[in-house]
Image (spheres, rainbow, N blue to C red):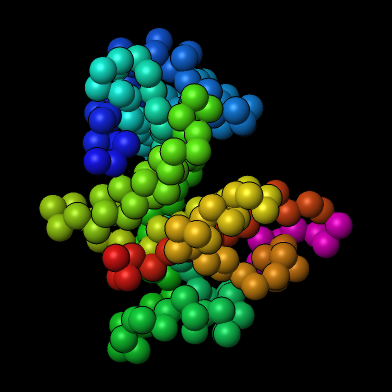
Amino acid sequence: MSFLEKCSQFRLGGKTVAEWSQFSCGDNDLDNFFLNDAANYERQLLGKTYCFALNEASSAIVCAFTLSASSVDVRNIPRSRRDKVTKNIPHEKSLSSYPAVLIGRLGVSSAYRKLGIGSELIEYIKHMSIDPDNLYSCRYLTVDAYNSGQTLKFYETNGFKLLFSSEQQEREYIGLSPERELKTRLMYFDLITV
């Protein structure tokens, strides 16, 4: 039995805001978003935040994530990368950008670390994104992953690939000067492989 099968999923809403105070994933930026910004983010139609709470203790939030509409724009990426991103798409269907779902935030409670929940949650999001009953279709999952070895390795282990082969290419793409720190890396996952 997977860990998330012991949980119930719910969307952030007014009645659950009080429960969030018990959730911490150990990252101040993520914690601040989930505790203070997620509800307004949803009101502004920028993304929806979901969480899983243990069935036996509904106030024990195990993990949370935010999803938004996005796209993978291939017009301005180097041709070699564009070919890798679109290699499984028939040539007659080539577009300048492809529909995607952005994992805007993803956090696992510090109390439930090292149980494989993050990877299980990624698998859940992959399958949720290709559900035949969705009102939309998307080809990719995307994430602006923290530019740290541990975070990048987590996403790579879960099948994500860097959109750019170098930080220099990515800086140029987003218009960041060479001396500025690249805090996140753009990554994608092709949902056709699920």
Main SS of the magenta part reads loop
Residue 14 higher or lower than 3, as above or below: above
The foreground one among 120 and 140 is 120
Which quarter shows the N terminus? top left
Residue 89 higher or lower than 21, as above or below: below
Q: Residue 185: x percent and y percent? A: 62, 57
Q: Residue furthest right?
A: 179
Q: Is residue 171 visible?
A: yes
Specify whether 188 is left or right of 133.
right
The foreground one among 185 and 122 is 122
Q: Residue 67: x percent and y percent? A: 39, 43
Q: Residue furthest left?
A: 133
Residue 163 higher or lower than 82, as above or below: above
Indicate whether residue 174 is drawn in magenta: yes
Specify whether 81 is left or right of 14.
right
Q: Residue at x 47, y 14 (%)?
A: 22
The magenta segment is 172-179
Q: Residue at x 15, y 58 (%)?
A: 132
Q: Residue 133: x percent and y percent? A: 13, 53
Which quarter shows the C terminus? bottom left
